[in-house]
Amino acid sequence: MQVARLIPRLLVVLIFFAPGVPVFAEKLDCKPQKGRQVFARCRKCHSLTAQSPEELSKGDQDRQKEGPTLFGMFQRPAGKVQGFVYSDSMRLAEFYWEQENLDAFLRSPLTFMTDTTMAFRGIRNDKQRLNLYCYLQSVTQVE
Ligand code: HEC
């Protein structure tokens, strides 16, 4: 019963290395699960796959999306997914996405970056943006 013996150990490992999301969610008083519902508005244009457009096969749905994958979005500077064609401002951006700038961008993309090609009006509801932020933190982290 090798497997049965492994399970407790696996659990310990899982608990130990569980992503910092709960801590995070507690600190910010946000609900990642609710953010998941908000992400429904982004899903049409954004995947959460680890692969860059160049790595995906031609027929892959994620390749056809209008926006870049958001996987790893907090761990690389803005506008840097290999093979994705960004607006000039996004391509030349020299900042990382953090709660504050992402919040401003998602509230009103065109106010934040006047030449962005992200055709999205924005989310007015503060709580929804906060929940969305926590959801994105929880699903886009590169190990
Ligand atoms: C109609 C398609 C569309 C929708 C809907 C959309 N986006 Fe985008 N998004 C884009 C495009 C296109 C870009 C690239 C913008 C640029 O180059 O200026 C982008 C860029 C981004 C970036 C910057 C990515 C990077 O690599 O730095 C983030 C973060 C982002 N979107 C998040 C979201 C979130 C969260 C939502 C949902 C609330 C959303 N987007 C909705 C098309 C979309």
Image: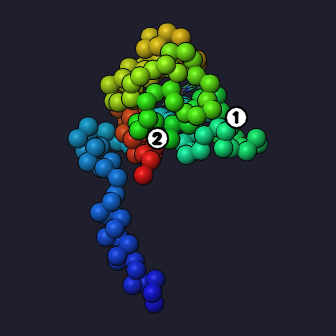
Kindly give the residue lying farthest to the right in the view shown. 59
For the residue carrying disc 1, how many other residues have a C-alpha within 10 Å: few (<14), some (14-19), or many (20+)? some
- Three-letter amino acid code at disc 2? Gly
Identify the residue at horizontal 35%, vertical 42% (top origin): 31
Q: Is residue 67 left or right of residue 112?
A: right
Residue 122 x, y percent position in the rendering: 48, 20
Q: Do the residues bearing badges 1 and 2 touch, measured as CB atoms within 8 Å? A: no
Q: Is residue 42 left or right of residue 12?
A: right
Where 133 falls versus 108 (above or below)?
below
Helix, strand or loop at mark 2: loop
Where 70 falls versus 66 (above or below)?
below
Kindly give the residue lying farthest to the left in the view shown. 27
Does the beta carbon at disc 1 come under 8 Å from ligand 1? no
Q: Say which residue label 1 marks.
A: 64
Q: How is the image coloured?
A: rainbow
Sequence-wise, which precedes: disc 1 or disc 2?
1
Residue 77 numbered mark, or none: none
Q: Say which residue label 2 marks.
A: 72
Q: Quadrant of the N terminus?
A: bottom left
Question: Disc 1 and disc 2: Cα gap in Å?
Answer: 19 Å
- The quarter holding residue 84 reads top right
Helix, strand or loop at mark 1: helix
Identify the residue at horizontal 31%, vertical 50% (top origin): 20
